Image (cartoon, grey):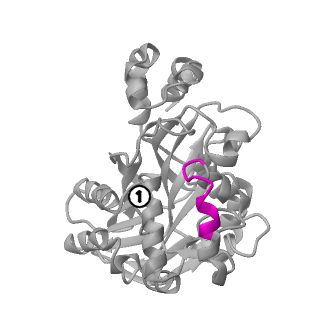
Amino acid sequence: MRDTYRILREELVPHFPDLASCRNTSELLSHPAYRRIAPSVGRVLTAAETESFAESEAPARDRYRIVAWNLERGIQYEGQLEALKNHHYLTACDVLLLTETDVGMARSGNRHVARDLARELGMHYAFAPCYVNLSKGAGVEYDVEGENLLGLHGNAILSRYPIRNVRSIPLKNGKDKMAGREKRLGQQTAIVADLALPGKTLNAVSVHLDAQSSQPHRRDQMRDVLDGLRGDRPVVIGGDWNTTTYNSSRAFHAIMGFWLRVFMGVDNVIDNHYLHPYHRFESALFALLESRGFDYRACNRLGEHTASFDFDDIKMHKDLREWLPAWCFPFIQWSLRNHDGKCPFKIDWFATREVQAVNPVVLHEFREGRETPLSNHDAIGVDILV
């Protein structure tokens, strides 16, 4: 990866300000600077990275603990590291499926989040780039001090057991990544690896489905992930699937969807859809998993939220205002008047095949009741018997 980072620093970063002036992907593709560096962009975005900081061989166990956590870029890296080192549940974790991990982004201290965590925890790791960021991020991230050194962002797997046969599965974009304030080259990418457990190989997948996409698009992204898996080995898929129930590919669709849910009854939608998206709005995604032999019911706390919308959260407000018109917000506040301005969602998931999953958990304590949440997502965990 040293060559990849050299390419970023020397060939790509100098062009970021110029490329960030493009209003959409069509303008980007016709820009002379981009046409010169496009092959280098491709090399960077397809270069999966692996390294090991394990100092000894991990023992065989009768069960293995898997945790999936959207780290929200790694902005709260120090707190996340402290939790991973000291929290009673996380210290027994064998595999981490991490989404939203930065490399050389100002918003996360220009650190390599996945590699730094692996080094501190003494684990093997694999990282797959998703985006080369031309700007510092979205919402409040845009105003952080400093500049990006590399501007890379992706998903990762950390393991106490050797990681082999790492591969990336690119997922089609749900929206034009150059059309908003946050300008990015690339697409969401699932990372897949074989974990060499004692006497057994486990296929692990860390996947982040697009937030600004439609329900059919998220289903299609999951189909691409499943199509990219090899053989009939035991598999654990985990990550942030953004099963909000909304078509968020355009503001208009999201606004129409909001009013549909108001007419359905806010209490009804929270209890039966936001917390159970497989009932209706995201049913095709979950039906697809089951048709391919995957189980999501035994490995998740069904009906338990993993993220929340909080109307009084300034950061969340600023993020939403980048694509929703200001007149929407009084209606959102009105709709949540009986819920203290808060709305729960179940958007982080596991799915397993050919393994027995037991004791799924949702760890709310890293997000709720804290002055500074460690992430805008709860970590989720499950033990598997292989």
Residue found at the very far right of the displayed protein: 371
Image: 302 above or below 187? below
The answer to which quarter of the image holds residue 55 is bottom right
Q: Is residue 2 left or right of residue 289?
A: right
Q: Position of residue 83 (x, y in %)?
A: 69, 67
Which residue: 65% across, 33% down?
A: 148
x, y percentage for residue 365?
Answer: 68, 76
Q: Which residues are magenta?
A: 322-332
Q: Is 42 displayed left or right of 160 in the figure?
A: left
Q: Could you say which is closer to the camera, residue 205 or residue 2?
A: 205
Amino acid type, residue under disc 1 in the picture: His
Q: Residue at x 58, y 60 (%)?
A: 328
Residue 265 visible, this angle: yes
Residue 342 placement (x, y as % from top left): 64, 75
One can see residue 89 in this view? no
Q: Quick check: 80 above or below 181? A: below
User: Which residue is drawn at the image coordinates 40% and 76% (left, top)?
Assistant: 277
Instruction: Give the SS element for disc 1.
Output: helix
Residue at the spot 27% in from the left edge and 75% down from the top edge: 354
Q: Is residue 329 magenta?
A: yes
**Label 1 belongs to which residue?**
253
Is-magenta flag for residue 155? no
